[in-house]
Amino acid sequence: MTIVFLAFAMYSQAGTVPPPGVSNRTLTRGDEPPVHYALSIPANYSTSKPVPLILALHFGVGGGSAAGAGRSVLSILVRPALEELGAIIVAPDSLRGDWSTAENERAVKELLDNVLGSYNIDKKEIVVTGFSMGGAGAWHIAEKYPDYFSAVIPVSGRPPASIAEWRLPVLAIHSHNDQVVPFGPTEARITELQKAGKRAELIPLTGITHYETYRFVDGLRQAVPWLRQIWKREDK
């Protein structure tokens, strides 16, 4: 049985509104490894009104510990770019390796289920995004669990080798000057999806290298009107 630390459980009780801001949380999972994650609650959150949910996946950590990496990508990139949406943002730390491992897949799914059961989330407004390894992870998790998401926004992430079964709207953000994850494959995948009649767009950036994460904020902020179109919600 999934159990969340007391601080989380206290706020998930009916009618209790958690304080706005970013906090570190832990999801315990019986015999499975715990999932450490950062959680951002918007200032306008109320239990009476559903809000969007953004799953943010962090970059690689060079084989070291991923402790705090979720909070880093949330604080440096995702929250500054997308806070206008008034969304709850959840950013887990990888258990081990990249986001395509079976254990990370399970951890992400259980975390999503827990957040969906604890907060008033609009289930038609759930997005997955990520940077670098997390951008590749956004592609992967969206393909693995398409029924959870309304859209995917990979940033500087290597796209999958095959997208034959792709279902979700995708907005890819990538720099021509990325020296780690080349621009070309992302452009090719977006073009392939467009030719297949899918909703797919690319925001190409210039003058930004792969390790300048903070400089992708303006590019990711361009996803706000795109998501509003996807959701058909002019008030968000």
Image (tube, rainbow, N blue to C red):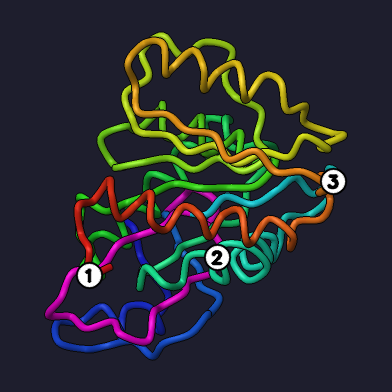
- Residue under circle 2? 81
Magenta residues, start to end: 30-55
The answer to whether 224 is drawn above or below residue 15 in the figure is: above
- Residue under circle 1? 235
Amino acid at pointer 3: Thr
Q: Residue 110 appears at what percent x and percent y?
A: 37, 49
**Numbered badge on residue 209:** 3
User: What residue sits 70% from the left and 43% below the top?
Assistant: 205
- Between discs 1 and 2, the one toward the N terminus: 2
Q: Residue 225 appears at what percent x and percent y?
A: 38, 56
Residue 1 seen anywhere in this rendered image of the structure: no
- Between discs 3 and 1, the one toward the N terminus: 3
Magenta-span inclusion, residue 47: yes
Q: Residue 152 appears at what percent x and percent y?
A: 43, 40
CA gap between label 3 and label 2 equals 18 Å
* Mark 1 vs 2: CB contact within 8 A: no
CA gap between label 3 and label 1 equals 34 Å
Give left or right: position of 226 versus 205. Answer: left
Residue 7 location, quadrant? bottom left
- Which element carries disc 1, helix, strand or loop? loop
Amino acid at pointer 2: Ala
Q: Residues within 10 Å of mark 2 (few under 14, many from 20)?
A: many
Q: Residues within 10 Å of mark 3 (few under 14, many from 20)?
A: some
